[in-house]
C-alpha cells in the first residue's frame, strides 16, 4: 500500500500486526511502545523523522482505546492524569532544548546513549529487586487470579520510602481519592517533569520511567498507575503529534492503519491486567527497559539505527 | 474431589468459549478493517496529502481528530462485538 504523505510503500497487514503487538504491551504496562514501533517503522524504510512523529500519533490512538478500557475497569485517576500532563509537557520541552544544546556541542549521540542505557538498566535492576522481594514476602499474591477490589490493594517492599515521600509537607497538598493518596503537588509535578524530560530527551512516551515512578514515588497502586499513565499519554502524545505534524513528520494514514491492530491489542492488554497482581505486572515490566537498552547499545556499537 | 473436577471442567469450557468468541471477533474485525482500508483510506489519502502540503496547522489538528475519532469508533466496535459474541457484558 502506498502512503503518499511519507512516500513509503508498506504492507497494511505488517502495520496492523505491529500495532496489535504494541497495543498489548501498552494496554498491559501503560507504555507507548515507541522502542518497538520506531525500529519497526524504520525497518520497512520509513525515514526516522516520520517514524518518530507517526509513532506519536499512533500512541495517541492506542492510548485512547486502552485508557477507555482501563477507565471501565476503574483504573484511571483523572485528577492525577491531568496534573501530570502539565509536568510532562514542561519536561518534554526542556528535554528537547537539552537535545538542541547537545547538538550544538556536537556530542548528542554519545550523551543520549549513555544516559538512556544507565536509566534503562537502573530501572530494570531496581524493579527486579523490588518485585521479587515483594512476591517472596507476600505468598498470598501468588495464588493466581485476583479479581475485583483486591487487585487494587497493591504491595511493595519499597512502601516505607514511598510513605516518607508522601509525608513531605510542601503545600499545596493534593488529595487523590481514587488512588487513596494525599501528596504534595510539587512531587507529582516533579515525577511528571522527569518523565517528560526523558520523553523529550530520548524520544517516545517514556512510560518506562513514568509508570514505575508513579508506583514507587507517588505511591499509586500498579493497576491505577498503568491506566492513569495511558490517560496522561493521550494528552502529552497529542501535544507531541501536533508539534511533529507542523514540522512535517507525521504520516497520519500509517498511524490510522497501525491503530486498527492496536485497538484489539490494547483491549486484550488492559483486560489482562485484572488477572495479575501488582508485583507480577512490575516483574513482567522488567524486560521492556532492557530491550530499550539493547537497542541503544546496538546503535552505539554499530553506528546504525535499528 | 468431584466438585473440583466439575469446576475445572466448567473453567475449561468457559476458556474454550471465550477463545472461540475471540477468534470469530477477530475474523469479523479483519473483514471490516479490510473494507475500511479500501474505502475510507483510499478516499482520505489524497485529501490529507494535499492538506499536509498546503495547510500544516490544519493537518495537525485533523490528524489528532482522526486518530482519536478512529480509536473511539474501533473501541466501541470491538466492545460491541465482544458483547454480541459472548452474550454478556464486557
Image (spheres, rainbow, N blue to C red):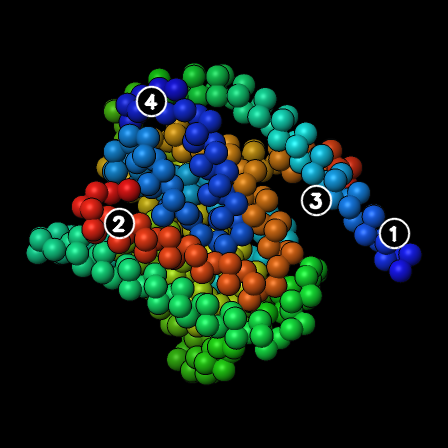
Chain letter of mark 3 equals B
Whether pointer 1 and pointer 2 mark residues with C-beta atoms closer than 8 Å, the reply is no
Q: Which callout, 4 or 2, points at the residue further toward the start of the chain?
A: 4
Q: Which callout, 3 or 1, points at the residue further toward the start of the chain?
A: 1
Whether pointer 3 and pointer 2 mark residues with C-beta atoms closer than 8 Å, the reply is no
Residue at 33% in and 30% down: A44
Q: Marks 3 and 2, Cα distance to the nearest angstrom?
A: 43 Å
Residue A82, visible in the rendered structure: no
Which residue position is annotated with label 3? B90
A150 left or right, relative to B69: right
Which residue position is annotated with label 1? B6
Q: Position of residue B73 (x, y in %)?
A: 56, 33
Q: Marks 4 and 3, Cα distance to the nearest angstrom?
A: 38 Å
Q: Where is residue A39 in the image (x, y as percent from the top left)?
A: 33, 41
Whether pointer 4 and pointer 1 mark residues with C-beta atoms closer than 8 Å, the reply is no
Secondary-structure class at tag 1: helix
Q: Where is residue A55 in the image (x, y as percent from the top left)?
A: 36, 40
Q: Quarter of the image holding residue A57?
A: top left
Tell me if residue A92 comes above or below residue A237 in the rendering.
below
Q: Marks 4 and 2, Cα distance to the nearest angstrom?
A: 26 Å
Which residue position is annotated with label 4? A9
Chain letter of mark 1 equals B
Q: Marks 1 and 2, Cα distance to the nearest angstrom?
A: 52 Å
Residue at 54% in and 38% down: A263
Which residue position is annotated with label 2? A298
Determine crowd level at label 4: few under 14, some 14-19, many 20+ residues with C-alpha closer than 10 A. few
Determine crowd level at label 1: few under 14, some 14-19, many 20+ residues with C-alpha closer than 10 A. few
> Closer to us: mark 3 or mark 1?
1
Q: Which mark is residue A41?
A: none
- Asked whether A242 or A22 is in front, the reply is A22
Amino acid at each position: 500500500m502506498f502512503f503518499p504523505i511519507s512516500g513509503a510503500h508498506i504492507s497494511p497487514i505488517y502495520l496492523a500486526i505491529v500495532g496489535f503487538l504494541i497495543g498489548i504491551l501498552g494496554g498491559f504496562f501503560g507504555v507507548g511502545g515507541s522502542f518497538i514501533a520506531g525500529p519497526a517503522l524504520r525497518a520497512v524504510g520509513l525515514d526516522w523523522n516520520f517514524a518518530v512523529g507517526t509513532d506519536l500519533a499512533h500512541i495517541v490512538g492506542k492510548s485512547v482505546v486502552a485508557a477507555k478500557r482501563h477507565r471501565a475497569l476503574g483504573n484511571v485517576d483523572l485528577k492525577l492524569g491531568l496534573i501530570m500532563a502539565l509536568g510532562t509537557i514542561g519536561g518534554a520541552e526542556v528535554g528537547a532544548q537539552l537535545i538542541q544544546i547537545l547538538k550544538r556541542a556536537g556530542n548528542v549521540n554519545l550523551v543520549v546513549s549513555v544516559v538512556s542505557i544507565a536509566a534503562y538498566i537502573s530501572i530494570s535492576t531496581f524493579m527486579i529487586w523490588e518485585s521479587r522481594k515483594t512476591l517472596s514476602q507476600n505468598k498470598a499474591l501468588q495464588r493466581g487470579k485476583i479479581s475485583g477490589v483486591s487487585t487494587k490493594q497493591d504491595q511493595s517492599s519499597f512502601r516505607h520510602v514511598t510513605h516518607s515521600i508522601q509525608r513531605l509537607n510542601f503545600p499545596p497538598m493534593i488529595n487523590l481519592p481514587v488512588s487513596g493518596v494525599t501528596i504534595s503537588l510539587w512531587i507529582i509535578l516533579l515525577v511528571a517533569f522527569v518523565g517528560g524530560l526523558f520523553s523529550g530527551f530520548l524520544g517516545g512516551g517514556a512510560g518506562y520511567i513514568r509508570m514505575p515512578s508513579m508506583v514507587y514515588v507517588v505511591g499509586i497502586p500498579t493497576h491505577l498507575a498503568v491506566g492513569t499513565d495511558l490517560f496522561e499519554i493521550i494528552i502529552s502524545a497529542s501535544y507531541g503529534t501536533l508539534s511533529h505534524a507542523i514540522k512535517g513528520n507525521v504520516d497520519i494514514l500509517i498511524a490510522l492503519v497501525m491503530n486498527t491492530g492496536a485497538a484489539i491489542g490494547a483491549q486484550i492488554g488492559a483486560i489482562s491486567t485484572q488477572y495479575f497482581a501488582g508485583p507480577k505486572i512490575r516483574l513482567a515490566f522488567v524486560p521492556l527497559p532492557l530491550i530499550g537498552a539493547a537497542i541503544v547499545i546496538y546503535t552505539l556499537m554499530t553506528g546504525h539505527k535499528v | 474431589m468431584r466438585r473440583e473436577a466439575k469446576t475445572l471442567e466448567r473453567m475449561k469450557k468457559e476458556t474454550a468459549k471465550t477463545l472461540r468468541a475471540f477468534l470469530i471477533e477477530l475474523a469479523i474485525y479483519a473483514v471490516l478493517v479490510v473494507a475500511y482500508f479500501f474505502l475510507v483510506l483510499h478516499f482520505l489519502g489524497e485529501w490529507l496529502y494535499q492538506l499536509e502540503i498546503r495547510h500544516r496547522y490544519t493537518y495537525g489538528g485533523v490528524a489528532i481528530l482522526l486518530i482519536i475519532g478512529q480509536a473511539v469508533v474501533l473501541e466501541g466496535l470491538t466492545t460491541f462485538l465482544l458483547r454480541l459474541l459472548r452474550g454478556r457484558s464486557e
